[in-house]
Image: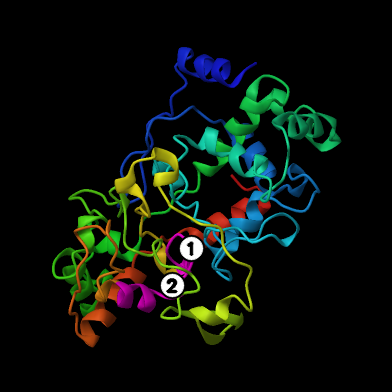
Amino acid sequence: MTWQGWAALVLVAGCQRAPVAPALGLPPLPPAPAANAATVELGRKLFLDARLSRNGTMSCALCHVPEQGFTAVEIGTSIGLEGRSLRRNAPTLLNVAYVGQLFHDGRSPSLEQQAWDPMLNAIEMGNPHAEDVVGKLRSLPDYAGLFEAALGGPADRARVAAALAGFERTLVSGNSRFDRWRYGGEAGALNRSEQAGFALFSGKARCIACHTVGEKDALFSDGRFHNTGIGAQRRDDPARSFRVQLAPGVFTQLRGRDVAGVSEPLEADAGRFEVSGVEAERWAYRTPGLRNVAITGPYMHDGSLTTLDDVIAFYQRGGVDNPGKDRLLAPLALSAQEQRDLAAFLRSLTGDNVGRLAVQSRAGEK
């Protein structure tokens, strides 16, 4: 069955996700193909399976590490097949069910379509054709009967995508301390510094203009694309400074001119422009949601900002000037205490189940 045929079958059958009670602070999940327990379990197995890569060394979970908030917190940009450096940071998969345009440049409109992109990327998982992956899955004894039981037929391109997407849509995390304070009426859930940080976030710092917060729920993203200037900077610009982690808790500072000596050059990255061809979208990237932001660094599309303090300092400077920089960005003039309060608020956005999701993804718990 073709991808289009499978999608049509799902729609004709009316298999939309049944209404569920979302975690506190989150809106209802968007409509999506239904995924039963067997489909989710199959997707979890595929997500962890390095055999889906050309040489059997790369899995989805190696860039989206469950114990690291379903991203990779130890490196700025991901590492692909045979140690190749990728040009972008791995975005977290927590709450990816709510993302309408996937990847930093928004090139994929659904999790089903997104699932094949890394598998067919020459330097990520390296498979030349989807048929190579499907053929391998059909030959592996431990997959015998799993696709038939979960999705009604043997492994094919559409069913592999459906299983992976079904699993990823379960990675939903809300009920943070912020949610309990704002939406749950729990007055003591945030301390005074964190409450002051939210007031700054909503007011003086203007973060809320892109990282939106509603009266009943919050995804902390407008889902749009913005040019902050990060993409316009040359990595080897002598004016740039990079905080590089040498070992857990051990850092050094490198200037832009030194980076070429310790890292291979990164490919040019024009952001959303590479998808749309619209000049106004050059160096623009999708606004990430801020839920779980304290545990999913480093930050920006290239992982070039290591800590929340680095991010706040970047916006304090008003981003990086370039002809297409978003007009919303301007220097903030926050005091040192205000910057600490803003960081404290951002640390309150961690969901209460992130550890449990990591354990479940490894153990196959449902």
Q: Residue at 59%, 75% (x, y): give it.
A: 260
Q: Nearer the viewer, residue 320 or 219?
A: 320
Q: Can you give x and y, in whole percent of width and height, for residue 114 in the image?
A: 54, 38
Q: Secondary structure at mark 1?
A: loop
Q: Residue at 53%, 33% (x, y): give it.
A: 113
Please tell me whether residue 263 is drawn above or below residue 142 in the rendered image. Answer: below
Identify the image quadrant of the C terminus: top right
Q: Can you give x and y, in whole percent of width and height, for residue 284 in the image?
A: 35, 53
**Disc 2 designates what residue?**
305
Please provide the residue range marked out in magenta. 295-314
Q: Nearer the viewer, residue 217 or 49?
A: 49
Colouring scheme, one of rainbow, by chain, secondary structure, one colour: rainbow
Label disc, if present, on residue 302 of the rendered structure: 1
Q: Nearer the viewer, residue 314 or 273?
A: 273
Q: Can you give x and y, in whole percent of width and height, for residue 306 in the image?
A: 46, 74
Apparent side of residue 56 relative to residue 337 in the rendered image (left or right): right
**What amino acid is found at the position of numbered circle 2 in the picture?**
Leu
Q: Residue furthest left?
A: 203
State whether residue 173 appears in this view: yes
Identify the image quadrant of the N terminus: top right
Apparent side of residue 46 relative to residue 298 in the rendered image (left or right): right
Please tell me whether residue 63 is drawn above or below residue 246 in the rendered image. Answer: above
Q: Residue at 50%, 43% (x, y): give it.
A: 170
